[in-house]
Image (tube, rainbow, N blue to C red):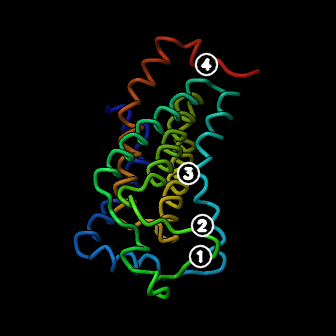
């Protein structure tokens, strides 16, 4: 575990700092107040960007897993296993909690101006907690950060750059769910933690497979 923390220190520190701040904000604000504050700065560019960027969670992880098959089978397997574990946790929690989404809480059917709406985005109404998209974004980019550094043995400078870029991609994707009013901050907070836990808990398995079956994990298309 010490080696895992050392090798992924920047990503873990950034995640801890940002999500600790979000957790503090959640303690001192209602979910409606925090949502309005985090969702107050809409722009035409933001509407366009987040509307499409959020789809990375739906398709990006499978595209990335397929592309990684041309490099390392073990990397592709790690991404898909992390997504499967995170997805199971998210879906079980969703169907236990049955939390309403912002569109229902703010009663957009009767008060359409209560929230800024992005044209072309169909707002969901149920199973808000936790955010599956936020979980997937952190699974995808945290796992990518790990496998890129593990297989390539980058120098410390390059490793930090990879972790920084991957964290920013993950955080931007998670925030897109708030911007689009598909989730509250609490949903994203929980989803991000689930994604990180899923990748972290599977890391020992990833290392063991690479050491026990190096030829299988190194197999690639080509």
Tell me which label, 4 or 1, sits earlier in the chain.
Answer: 1
How far apart are the two marked residues, 4 and 1, measured between alpha carbons? 43 Å
Left or right, 143 with reference to 85: right
Q: Which residue is mark 2?
A: 50
- State which tag comes first along the sequence, 2 or 3: 2
Q: Which mark is residue 57?
A: 3
Vertical placement of residue 98 versus 74, above or below: below
What is the quadrant of the N terminus in the image?
Answer: top left
Work out whether residue 168 or residue 8 is closer to the camera in this orientation and state it: 168
Q: Is residue 187 above or below residue 193?
A: below
Q: CA distance from mark 3 to mark 1?
A: 18 Å
- N-terminal label among 1 and 2: 2
Mark seen at residue 118: 1
Q: Which residue carries the number 4 mark?
A: 218
Q: Quadrant of residue 219?
A: top right
In this view, the mark in front (4 or 2): 2
- Of 121 and 152, nearer the camera is 121
């Amino acid at each position: 575990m010490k080696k895992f923390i050392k090798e992924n220190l920047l990503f873990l520190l950034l995640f801890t700092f940002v999500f600790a701040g979000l957790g503090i904000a959640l303690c001192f604000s209602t979910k409606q107040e925090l949502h309005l504050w985090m969702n107050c700065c809409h722009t035409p560019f933001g509407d366009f960007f987040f509307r499409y960027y959020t789809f990375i969670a739906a398709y990006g992880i499978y595209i990335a897993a397929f592309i990684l098959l041309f490099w390392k089978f073990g990397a592709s397997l790690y991404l898909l296993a992390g997504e499967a574990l995170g997805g199971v946790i998210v879906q079980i929690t969703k169907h236990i909690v049955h939390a309403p989404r912002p569109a229902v809480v703010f009663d957009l059917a009767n008060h359409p101006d209560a929230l800024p709406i992005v044209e072309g985005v169909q707002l969901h109404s149920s199973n808000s907690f936790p955010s599956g998209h936020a979980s997937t974004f952190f699974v995808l980019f945290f796992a990518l950060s790990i496998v890129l550094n593990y297989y390539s043995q980058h120098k410390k400078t390059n490793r930090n750059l990879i972790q920084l870029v991957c964290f920013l991609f993950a955080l931007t994707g998670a925030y897109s769910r708030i911007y689009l009013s598909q989730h509250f901050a609490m949903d994203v907070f929980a989803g991000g933690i689930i994604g990180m836990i899923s990748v972290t808990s599977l890391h020992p398995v990833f290392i063991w497979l690479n050491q026990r079956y190096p030829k299988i994990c190194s197999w690639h298309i080509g």
